[in-house]
Image (tube, grey):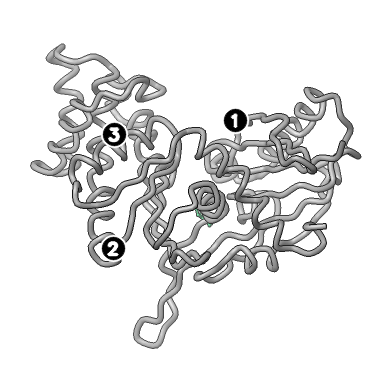
Amino acid sequence: MKYIMLIDSGTTNSRIRLIDQSSSAVEGSVKVEAGVRNTAMSGSNEELKQAVKQGIEKILRDNSIQKQDIQYILASGMITSNLGLHEVAHQKAPADTEKLAAAMEKRCLEEMLYIPCYFIPGLKSMEEIEGRTEVLDVMRGEETEAFGLLDVMQLSGDGILMLPGSHTKWIRADGCGKLLWSSTSLSGELLKAVQSRTILSDSLPEGLITKLDERALWKGFSAAETMGVNRALFQIRLQHLSGSTEENERANFLTGVIFHSDITALKEMNQQNGGWVLIGGSFPLKDAAASLIKRTLPEIEVIEASSEQVERGAWRGPLVIAEQKEELSK
Ligand SMILES: O=C(O)C(=O)C[C@@H](O)[C@H](O)CO
């Protein structure tokens, strides 16, 4: 049997998947607790290299196969950035899978056991402003995820994908196979930073939300609306001191506060562009975003991808791009 390996490195974690080349079934999956944040913090990509190498070795061991059984690796996400393992220049949006496939770069790296790896570029959104070309946004990984999710969902018409995560992304799809632009917020990283680096550490559980609490989420959202984000955040300490809430309620409240500006941004984007809103990402941010959007923007057609559809989209993405490259589609 021959396999394809997929590596998707984000800011915080990396995911390695093993795909059976003939059936496209996922045969194995390993989550590696390393992403480009390790490089950003230490100034070296050594930790990421080691983590990726160990992840590849583990998945080979777990499935009792050799590196020679892997035809090639497809790498997407921040692993293709200056903080990753091999930097590939962003392609300009609008882009379809063909454009990304043509711009993939092939490398054989020691930390990937010299298995040929095709690095899929990210996308940048540009605009001409007063004669100057400005970069409005960049993404690495979410374009691949978006192509996968669109392939799985088979939606008609155009719309915006919202992918909550360390960096929350909004990606405009034209309904004809192209991604037009993206926009980013730092919501996931901000949640983590507030939890781990402020006085609120004492009031919040390390892993944040364990169970969605729509009441507390909404309370946080409303507090940000009425008193602004910074004061709303301090309410978490006050709730803790008054003994009126549980840790998980406070984690939901925090998420409501942080998502307030994201939902406001989505409202504006939808007013300007119309179409559906497809929510991807994973628990708990996917569920929190969906809950808030349905409550605050009932006029929008919201489609919430299931966890199973999101997972399928994650591995379909690199494959639908590779299908556009002649040497890989044989
Ligand atoms: O392209 C880059 O260099 C980024 O920093 C984009 C970043 O937001 C990723 O999309 C997160 O997954």
Disc 3 marks which residue? Answer: 255
Secondary structure beneath dot 2 equals loop
Q: Earlier in the sequence, mark 3 or mark 1?
A: 1
Secondary structure beneath dot 1 equals loop
- The local crowd at label 3, few if under 14, some if 14 to 19, many if 20 or more residues have their Cα within 10 Å, is many
Question: Measuring 71% from the left and 49% from the top, which residue is drawn there?
Answer: 74
Left or right: residue 216 versus residue 324 is: left
**Residue 182 image point, x, y percent:** 42, 61
- For the residues labelled 3 and 1, the Cα–Cα distance comes to 23 Å
- For the residues labelled 1 and 2, the Cα–Cα distance comes to 38 Å
Disc 2 marks which residue? Answer: 274
Question: Measuring 51% from the left and 33% from the top, which residue is drawn there?
Answer: 308
Disc 1 marks which residue? Answer: 33
- For the residues labelled 2 and 3, the Cα–Cα distance comes to 26 Å
Secondary structure beneath dot 3 equals helix
Q: Do the residues labelled 2 and 3 touch (CB within 8 Å)?
A: no
**Residue 236 image point, x, y percent:** 20, 26
Amino acid type indicated by mark 1: Glu
Q: Earlier in the sequence, mark 1 or mark 2?
A: 1
Left or right: residue 12 versus residue 119 is: left
Tell me if residue 267 can be seen.
yes
Relative to 143, residue 196 above or below: above
- Camera-side residue of 280 and 85: 280
Relative to 177, residue 109 above or below: above
Res. 96 image quadrant? bottom right
